[in-house]
Image (cartoon, grey):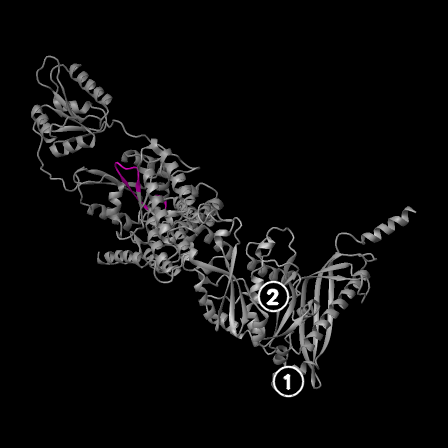
Amino acid sequence: MRRIRTCCLLVLLSLFVTGCWNRTELNELGITVATGFDRENGKWSMSYQIAVPSAMGTAQSGSGGGGGGGKPSVHVFTTVGSSIREAADLGYVENPRRLYFAHTDLLVIGREAAEFGISEILGLYFRNNDARETVLVALTDGKARDILTKVVPSETMPGTALAEIIQKESNFSSIFPKVKVYELAQKVLSDAGAAGVPVLEFTGKGQSGMESLEQTTSSPGTLKLTRLGVFHRDRFVGWMNREESFGISWLSDHVKGSTLAFGCSEGSQEKKQSSFRITNAKTTVTPIKSGEHFKMKIKVKAKGDLLEFQCNGDLTKPEVIRKIEKTLEEDILAIIQAGWKASKRMRVDLPGFADKVHRKYPKTWREIKATWEDELAHIELDTEVHVSVQRPGLIKKSFEQLQKETGEQDR
Amino acid sequence: MVGKGNQDSNENLPSDLSQSVEIFRNRLGKSSDFKAREIILPGESSPVAAICYFNGLVDLKSINKMIATVNDFLLGENQGKPSPSSIVDIIPGDLRKSGNIDNLIQAVLDGSTVMLIDGIPSAAIVSLPGGRRRSVEEPSSQTVIRGPKEGFTEDVATNIALIRRKIRSPELRFEDRTIGRVTKTRVSVAYINGIAKDEVVKEVLTRLDRIDVDSILESGYIEEYIQDTTATPFPTLINTERPDAVAGNLLDGQVAILVDGSPFVLVAPVTFFKFFLASEDYYQRYDISSFLRLIRLFSFLVALLLPSLYIAVTTFQQEMIPTTLLISLAAQREGTPLPALLEALLMELTFEVIREAGVRMPRVVGPAISIVGALVLGQAAVQAGLVSAAMVIIVSFTAISNFVIPYFSMSAAVRLVRFALMLLAGTFGLYGILAGGIPLLIHMVSLKSFGVPYFLPLAPLSFTNLKDVLIRAPWPLLKTRPSYISSDNRDRQASKKQSKNSK
């Protein structure tokens, strides 16, 4: 009997405990979709893109004044402080809700912050349990805040949409491989110490705040992934263009799928009218010591389907297929070399050769560790690309060729 | 038929008829439904015999017939006065003789007819049952799509017959007890000799004998007296309205307790998983039955945990919800005034009130309640912004899941435990659910029903018995009875070797 009484008492007492401790109702949360880091006058300036649930389509009528309507679905505000978390907590002077970072999808770093160094940002993400290390990272040439205030058409939450863009691009184009906070940290701390981060930029004309974009069906300006921002250790060192970035993607085995345009003969740069969809690609890098320096043996294997074909030739014949493969191999080789050239130019080891060398030649690595950046210039690539066309498609010849042939028969 | 607590006075019947009738009248307090019909032969002043019965308990037609037979006998060939004791010999039907007044009065109370004869100090007890009783109908609490549609009635004799009709074996035994000092209720214990464990039968009978109470009006009284643990929300005896379910249980080696006046028959010993088996499981194909059993167990978990999980996840562990769902939930919660815990408690309590009202209210006002319940409380509460729509969905799904459990006593237990878990979840989040759930599991595992661990055959684990627990194996594979309940006689069907030999 006494035990039952104690149990009842405990249950009753627990009624009074509710509402204390760390309980937070959903409507007290400021769900941060994206965060931006900027440096201003020697201080951290943090920008948050917070979801406004009442503006979402699912909001209940009767509460929050009808919901939806013209209300923007996110709210952006900026706070400044000498440390990042101080800046975050200063947010409470203007924001009634608890900033909640567990559902953040995107982290945007402004150029000044990137030049100042991102180690503080990385440290913050690893020290605290509410911030996730799986957040995608993007860089921008200007202020991160400017990216966060832009609306991505057709999406309710711009931060999530941008994260989706980075994700999809990485899977279907592989030009700017996505990088998450923990991956960035791993790369920065690796032997190579170099990392590439996709760059978001606002292109096109027009002021394009949230208001101006709402009434158009095709916005004059859009947010795009344009370049790759290169970090050496935790500092920003430079940009890489599309092709160079794609080369680095191939070298570092980040190609998951992509579409390549190619011409009819090897090396023909104009008239790239046919396209090839890479569905499967694999790059292996083996360092080989040759004399004083290193040689990188790079083997690339790519498989895929033919999407478009505008050249002459019967696709049922193996030699035609072989010719296409050859052309593609040359193209990929050129892309890889462009990437490597850019990497050498910037004196950063973006493909991460250092770690491979360290693993294979640990003793030598200790000697050359200090001068690795100089060593890079002496590294030679021995690249071998193998492309195989898996499915040439449903028709054998190009349409143009068929037209010509039927024309001849008619005559 | 003398039960416990009866003061046996061993008073014997006097041989004088009018005196006897007077004793009967006085003992029964001149109750208006007591009748004593006297048989007076033409030309005589004093009656030869008297027939005593309670109006409504006996079949009047049979009594009239009996009187006619006696009259014919007395006026017929045997002119003159035949010996009174010979009257007894010509009475048709189930007959017993007794001279003890208490016995006779008890017999009248049980619904028998007593014939007092002038001149001899003993009387005949004739069983001429009659009167209005509910006929065998389809059970209202446990319905099936496929399977027998008959259900137990309030009459224990009918119920025994219903079981006997299903199991025509000489080994099917019924042992009777009369319990209740005032009500003198007939309680019958059914088991199959050689399949049920002797210890269990003995234990059931000893526990029944231990009951000393003035009234037993329903099998629920018995259940509370003989269950192993009182301090638990979980039932340790099954009650069912279905004769086929009882027959199946008896064939598994369980013991059934039939109580006069209640269509609910108790079955013991039971394990936790028996509460998730419907008798239909054995009539339908095994694959669909197995699927349905898993659905029932899933519903049990939903009914037990869904509201508390919702509370815990939305107020403590928001990071566990996918982003889009979180924002959709947050959008619904915008402007709702109450914290999630209170909101959930409020809605659950409201539902319990509606459900109780649904059971108690007169049938005619049923539609009114459903309109108020569904429209006003559900839709209007959401539109008024008092409750979030997600909460209404959670509460409704929980309620529906609760009805999936085939036995009402188990779903009642779930209802109670659910509230405790909700409070814990609202206080400590997921940690609270575990802090409540683990002791709950420990408690359930430690329960016993007539010596059988409650969580058999999962804990302790016994693989051979798992064929008919979470899933139901096809009948040809169910070769043995559950070993934890039945005695050593376990073979349900001949194994292959034996059947070959017999050919």
Q: Amino acid at mark 1?
A: Thr
Residue B333 appears anywhere in the view: yes
Q: Mark 1 = which residue? A: A371
Q: Position of residue A150 (x, y in %)?
A: 58, 59
Task: Choose between A28 and A388: the one closer to the eye.
Answer: A28
Which range of residues does the magenta coloring cover? B250-265
Q: Position of residue B373 (x, y in %)?
A: 38, 39
Q: Position of residue B257 (x, y in %)?
A: 28, 42
Residue B195 appears anywhere in the view: no
Q: Residue at x 10, y 19 (%)?
A: B47
As for residue A311 lying within the magenta part, the answer is no
Image mark count? 2
Q: Residue at x 39, y 38 (%)?
A: B143
Q: Is residue A95 left or right of residue B97?
A: right
Quadrant in the rendering for residue A220: bottom right
Q: Is residue A198 above or below residue B194?
A: below
Q: Position of residue A270 (x, y in %)?
A: 80, 63
For the residue labelled by badge 2, is the local secondary structure a helix, a strand or a loop?
loop
Q: Mark 2 = which residue? A: A178
Q: Is residue A117 above or below residue A220?
A: below
Q: Amino acid at mark 2?
A: Lys
Check the residue under mark 1 and report the chain it is in.
A
Whether discs 1 and 2 lie on one chain: the answer is yes
- Local crowd at mark 1 within 10 Å, few (<14), some, or many (≥20)? few
Q: CA distance from mark 1 to mark 2?
A: 29 Å
